[in-house]
Image (spheres, grey):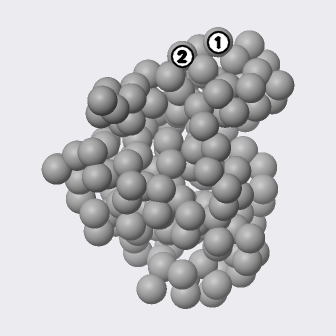
Amino acid sequence: MEIEVLKKVKCPDNVIKHCIAVYKKSMEIASNFNNVNKDLLKKGALLHDIGRSKTHNLDHAVKGAEIARKLNYSPEVCSIIEKHVGAGITENEAIKLGLPKKSYIPKTLEEKIVAHADNLLSGTKNVDIDFVIKKWEKKIENPKKNIKRLILLNNELIERFKE
């Protein structure tokens, strides 16, 4: 159903393929936990980039949450969409970036999983944490705090489960 929604709002094909890859990666990460709402995770992962039907800027997450609200998705799904960028954006960072003043830090397990699954993909290709760090070092001004959040998220969701 969510794939049809992405098509209906005219998400580009490459974005739809990326959303499917994020869904698969999210389910892979979710296998580390026994308390994940998999239906919520599926909807959030598949719709996380719905805002790219309108813009490819940083505010695609905010616009995506607005679209999902209009389509009557739950507040939990909308929150996953809104908070999926990077390892989250603080209220102060949001102001500097021109986003509405609020915290976009993922809090729930499902929000964290979708955000991090998105981090670990470049299009539909799996990438590792080192790839993401190098990308952020080139892309983000003063990336230290963002990279620290990324590493903490990776440790919480993946590293602590490795043997």
Specify whether 131 is left or right of 103.
right
Q: For numbered disc 1, what is the local secondary structure?
A: helix
CB under 8 Å between discs 1 and 2? yes
Q: Amino acid at mark 2?
A: Lys
Residue 58: x %, y % from top left? 72, 44
Q: Amino acid at mark 1?
A: Lys
Q: Quadrant of the N terminus?
A: bottom left
Instruction: Name the outermost residue toward the front.
Output: 163
Quadrant in the picture for residue 4:
bottom right
Mark 1 closeness class: few <14, some 14–19, many ≥20 residues within 10 Å: few
Residue 5: x %, y % from top left? 55, 82
Res 148 label: 2
Residue on which the image places disc 1: 144
Residue 9: x %, y % from top left? 65, 80
Q: Residue at x 67, y 56 (%)?
A: 125
Is residue 78 in sight in this rendering? no
Q: Measured along the vertical axis of the image, is residue 86 above or below residue 26?
A: above
Q: Measured along the vertical axis of the image, is residue 109 above or below residue 141?
A: below
Q: Residue at x 78, y 56 (%)?
A: 56
Q: Measured along the vertical axis of the image, is residue 38 above or below residue 93?
A: below
